[in-house]
Amino acid sequence: MAANQEEQEQEQRRRLLAVASRFPLPSGCRFSYGTAGFRADGATMAPAVCRAGILAALRSVKLAGAAVGIVITASHNPFGDNGVKIADPDGGMMAQHWEPFADALTNAPDPDALLQLVLQFCRDEGIPLGSQHTAQVLLGRDTRPTGAYLLDAALQGINAIVGACAIDMGILTTPQLHWMVRSKNKGVKASESDYFMQLIGSFRRMLELVPKDKIGGEEKLIVDGANGIGGVKLEQIKAELSGLDINVRNSGKEGEGILNHMCGADFVQKERVTPHGFSSEDVGVRCASLDGDADRLVYFRLPSASDNRVDLVDGDKILSLFALFIREQLDIVNNNGGQANKSLSARLGIVQTAYANGASTQFLKSLGLEVAFTPTGVKYLHKRALDYDIGIYFEANGHGTVVFSEDLISQLESLSNELASQAPTGSAQRHAVMRLLATSQLINQAVGDALSGLLLVEAILQYKGWSFQNWCELYSDLPSRQLKVKVKDRSVIVTTDAETKVSQPSGLQELIDKETANYTHGRCFVRPSGTEDVVRVYAEASTQVEADSLAKSVAHHVERILG
């Protein structure tokens, strides 16, 4: 037995040395694992992707063989870039405390250094190497030309860990892969067809629960697919989405355009103009834009044929629509008399970052909703949202989702059955419960998902009988300005209170407060960039001129103190 164990350990060492030799680190390259995983020019990514394969397999071994995911994508980055990120068993991002090891592993300078690093980490973490402990890693990639080549690198990395099993799930949106990992670990069906069936089925249930007086004809929607995988997938299912007439532009078809070039959610949100492929003929039509890997969603409308500027509905306003709808359903459940409603108590929480427009925060608070703030980054938002029975989070860029606690889902299912026995035809209260259950199925609870988010938006607009204009009028955004200040060392800036206040260097926060006090509805904060030596300045005020002036004044103080 001992001899066999020793042979397996030797085999494990041999595999790691061999794979590291096949994928040497390019000279001058340094990779850093962040919210987006590793990203760079696709041609240079193979060593990082191979080592991400090793990392994902070790993560699975550590977690007793639970499925872990790898997505090969660079999201909204240019066509030539590519990247890799790892999904934990719950479908969320890889645990943050593994990120330093990810960096060290990916930047190990030679095969022996990589081997020693892995062996030491496994000793520290109690990970059994070279034994019969199994690992399973699900892989997905987007439509980038380097995807197939990088998939092979990932497979070689995974197979370098004895007992690891790699399952190629195919060409997918990033959220699909996250959903599959979560589903597999929950013991439910986890194929792409299962994902589509869940989305289509729950969308249909939502439309069946639209009040009779709100039912209209088919709603027309034009979707900008960013010439990425989201457009491809939406084309596959749009015929089955009754009640919606979807026209996909920038769908990823040959000759239609380049991935993320002058199109996609990131482009529309930042530039506030129509994407490539849209024209004056689209005036007044509701439009949506996905990003390259379909984990971000924004809506827009072209108000005039005279230029290409758009009315934008960003992540803040999508969040507000979801919050309004869910709050309304909870109110119907809890305010309809009778004994059954006493069994449902749900804590609804909204989670934002300091970049959320102040007008959205005020709107949400005016509804009596609890609003919490976290530092910038989806990993912080998602974690905080899990503290609630229903947690809703979105960034302005259109990345966000809704999460439901397992306990609340159980309560809703019990209440639905109880109400069905009391009123077989269905009371208003039971319909509200059913809408909440359908919402929990329609939204991708693992991660922000542009496809599921889009269908939930459309279902809610139909339920409320709202036009795009009604949605826009929820509140008016305060004008804002973002600036970047180049500094020698960004780490000098230390923030507190979810990045809204500066604690170091001393005196800077007092200067920011003094400048902000000069403006009506003034708000300003600064924070160090996570990726480059710059300090980011964000300012809001009543007018664009005032927001620009406030941002400029604060940027000047930052430059003077840190320059």
Image (cartoon, rainbow, N blue to C red):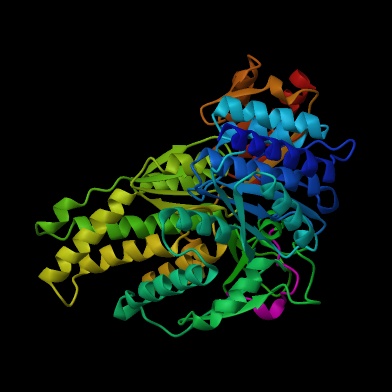
Q: Does the magenta run of residues contain 273?
A: yes
| Nearer the observer, 19 or 359 | 19
Judged left or right of residue 150, residue 501 is left
Quadrant the C terminus occupies: top right
Quadrant the N terminus occupies: top right
Q: Which residues are magenta?
A: 272-285
Judged left or right of residue 341, residue 288 is right
Q: Does the magenta run of residues contain 354?
A: no
Outermost residue toward the bottom in this view: 217
Judged left or right of residue 311, residue 497 is left
- Point 51% across, 36% down: residue: 374
Outermost residue toward the top in this view: 506
Relative vertical location of residue 31 with respect to residue 415 in this rendering, above or below: above
| Nearer the observer, 158 or 281 | 158
- Point 71% across, 77% down: residue: 280
> In x, y percent, where is residue 357?
54, 45
